[in-house]
Image (cartoon, rainbow, N blue to C red):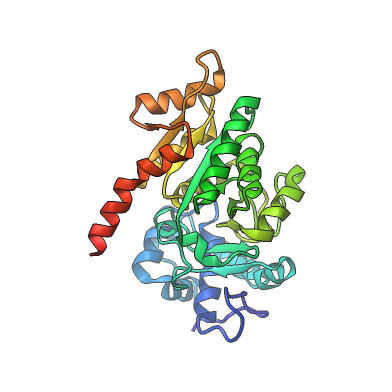
Amino acid sequence: MFTPTRPSIPAPTSGPDPLAELRAARAFLMRLVDQPAAPGLEQFIARAGALAAAEQLCNGDIPEALAAHLPRARVRAAAAAAAVDGEAAARCGARLLIPEDEPQWPARAGGAGAVGLWVRGHAALEILAGPSITLTGSRAATSLGAHVAADLAGELAAAGRTVVTGAGFGIDAAAVRGALAAHGTTVAVLGCGIDRVYPAAHDALLARIAETGLLVSALPPGTTPGRHHALARHRLLAALGDATVVVEAAARSGALHIAAAAAGLGLPVLAVPGATSSACSVGPHRLIRQGATLVTRAADVLEALEPAAETTAIAGA
């Protein structure tokens, strides 16, 4: 039996938690899959099941294939850290959402490698599994790019789509403000622990997101931002949207990695063209040449998603 933490890991709903043991197990496993992850660990968890995997590892029975990258000392440290995650979560009002929490759990998050998701905010958790669009782009956005992103996000929000961003500088922030101005719902995927504020300059913006939307992190509480968390964050950003729209991106922008993650998950990638003289147009233009759908307004985005919606409806018939 895997022993739940004290205090217990906060569940999505109030009252007794029938999944308390499993929730604690997943909080522990999140500590282990946090970078640098042991090769094969995610596959082991998927094969054994979260609860059985956590029990086996905590008992010191580490599979030979994992032993070289997962020493017992690291397992003990993860267990000790997870034991206080309940306290950290309670202090900031966060809850741990796990795949067994249906219908709130976003199905594609598992494909992005998420063992669980720490969330905080006042929106219903079901929005994570509802209609949504990921908007991303350059941190050093042009004034035109920021204007386009805000308009696009506002129109999508007005059409009932949740706007998903990384809540960073530039296009991210413009998209959040546009969606909020339209009284829409936003989700911010953090590159740090759910109890941290990053970037610090966006303290007020993140608070506004939490008022009507959600802050989400696949990283354990207390985790500081780092480049080694970028890949997992990019995958989660892509997974939480029905499509990813890129508004401005330089040749090596992280937004292009998010677009690549979306494509890898089989999700639509869309891009807004820009001035040929702008370095921020290089990324979107490259994506369009590679097959991304060219969009200039929200109606284009919704139209591009219609075939996918029809396919889903037919499959469910």
Residue shown at the point (45%, 75%) measured from the top left: 51
In the rendered image, residue 242, in percent from the top left (x then y), is placed at: 42, 50
In the picture, residue 102 is in which quadrant? Answer: bottom left
Q: Is residue 138 visible?
A: no
Residue at the spot 60% in from the left edge and 47% down from the top edge: 179
Quarter of the C terminus within the rendering? bottom left
**Residue under the point 65% across and 65% down:** 122
Looking at the image, residue 26 lies above or below residue 256: below
Residue lying farthest to the bottom in this orientation: 16
How many labels were placed on the picture? 0
Nearest the viewer among 160 and 237 is 160
Q: Is residue 265 above or below residue 271?
A: below
- Identified at 44% across, 40% down, the residue is 299
Q: Position of residue 53 (x, y in %)?
A: 43, 71
Looking at this view, is 36 or 123 the one in front?
123
Question: Which corner quadrant of the image does residue 77 belong to?
Answer: bottom right
Asked whether residue 296 is in view, the answer is yes
The vertical placement of 214 against 191, above or below, is: below
The x and y percentages for residue 229 are: 56, 47
Tell me: 285 left or right of 173.
Answer: left
Q: Position of residue 274 (x, y in %)?
A: 51, 22
Residue 259, quarter of the rendered image: top left
